[in-house]
């Protein structure tokens, strides 16, 4: 990971870890992040603004916008179809057209001045959700995350990227990245630098909570992570008091039907490996009753 990416990720993960700080601190380090380099295989579309330069003929140079019909309007040539072409292909096409009827050995250069035809969407717990343009086909996940102002204080640190067109390298259409740990895994580091494609949707998941109540040292709400189990939540609450029963009840509400399910977990049996340690779900409530002597 480059030092620029390290600084940006460190700020974002610090915002995730902070209990009361707002996450826009990620924007404070946006400037050191290098802009993605334009890609030679970017194909222009309606809305893109091109920069067409004809050397030695400034009157022919223009900054045309690609229209909805895929055309650009140029002096001498009139309307020229460019949608779906790379800048190199547009350059070759314009050079041929100008050299055929108007100029001797024309020297043409074509660049994309404004990328406005391909977008991804940032949703969920980011400071500025919405559409973000792809810049030359090399916009990365970390780039749009920083452009969106980083994560809010309500974010869990989990990012889900859904690919609308095609799939990722492993064949899946959803890629998951988890921020917030002191160090990123090599896989999460790699995924933050994955180039995005038009139509991708990146969703920053909110924090989910479980409640531990009754005879524990610190009853209250605790953030749910993917690995949190019943015994883990009780440990996070400081463990049982001297009066707490080993057999605890977990109350779970089905979000689809609103039905309530209650099941018992024997913490002593879990510790001995005789019973499984059930993973928790969002909004579960663990109730620890008082022992009767």
Image (cartoon, helix red, strand yellow):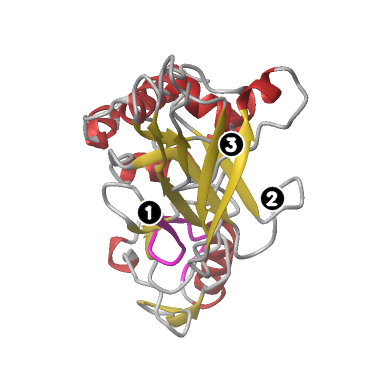
Furthest-front residue in view? Answer: 293
Which contiguous range is marked in magenta? 103-123
Tag 3 or tag 1, which sits nearer the N-term?
1
Pinpoint residue 110: horizontal percent, then vertical percent.
45, 57
Looking at the image, is mark 3 or mark 2 earlier in the sequence?
2
Name the residue located 43 percent from the left edge and 19 percent from the top edge: 243
Residue 18 locus on image (x, y percent): 29, 25
Q: Is residue 277 visible?
A: yes
Do we see residue 193 in this rendering? Answer: no
Quarter-wise, where is residue 163 in the image? Answer: bottom right
- Image position of 195 with respect to 272: above or below: below
Looking at the rendered structure, which numbered label has been put on residue 168? 2
Marks 1 and 3 sit apart, C-alpha to C-alpha, by 19 Å
Q: Secondary structure at mark 3?
A: helix
Mark 3, residue position:
191
List x then y, in percent, for residue 275: 74, 30
* 85 with respect to 46 (left or right): right
Whether residue 8 sits left or right of residue 174 in the image: it is left
Disc 2 secondary structure class: loop
Cα separation, mark 3 vs mark 2, equals 10 Å
Percent of width and height locating residue 100: 57, 74
Disc 1 designates what residue? 124
Task: State the residue at coordinates (52%, 73%).
Answer: 82
Q: Is residue 108 magenta?
A: yes
Identity of the residue drawn at 67% across and 56% down: 173
């Amino acid at each position: 990971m480059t030092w620029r990416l390290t600084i940006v990720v460190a700020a974002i993960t610090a915002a995730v870890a902070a209990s009361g700080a707002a996450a826009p601190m990620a924007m404070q380090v946006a400037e050191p992040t290098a802009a993605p380099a334009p890609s030679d295989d970017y194909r222009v579309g309606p809305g893109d603004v091109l920069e067409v330069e004809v050397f030695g003929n400034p009157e022919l140079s223009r900054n045309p916008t690609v229209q909805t019909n895929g055309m650009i309007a140029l002096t001498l040539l009139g309307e020229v179809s460019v949608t779906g072409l790379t800048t190199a292909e547009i350059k070759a096409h314009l050079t041929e057209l100008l050299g055929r009827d108007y100029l001797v050995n024309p020297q043409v250069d074509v660049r994309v001045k404004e990328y406005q035809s391909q977008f991804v969407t940032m949703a969920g717990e980011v400071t500025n959700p919405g559409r973000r343009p792809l810049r030359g086909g090399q916009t990365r996940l970390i780039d749009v995350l920083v452009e969106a102002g980083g994560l809010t204080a309500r974010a869990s640190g989990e990012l889900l990227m859904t690919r609308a067109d095609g799939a990722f390298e492993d064949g899946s259409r959803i890629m998951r990245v988890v921020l917030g740990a002191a160090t990123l895994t090599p896989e999460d580091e790699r995924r933050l630098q994955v180039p995005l494609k038009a139509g991708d949707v990146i969703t920053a998941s909110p924090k989910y909570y479980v409640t531990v109540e009754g005879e524990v040292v610190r009853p209250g709400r605790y953030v749910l992570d993917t690995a949190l189990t019943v015994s883990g939540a009780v440990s996070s609450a400081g463990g049982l008091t001297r009066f707490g029963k080993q057999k605890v009840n977990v109350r779970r509400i089905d979000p689809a039907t609103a039905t309530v399910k209650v099941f018992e977990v024997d913490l002593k049996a879990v510790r001995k490996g005789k019973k499984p340690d059930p993973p928790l779900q969002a909004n579960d409530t663990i109730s620890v009753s008082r022992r009767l002597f």
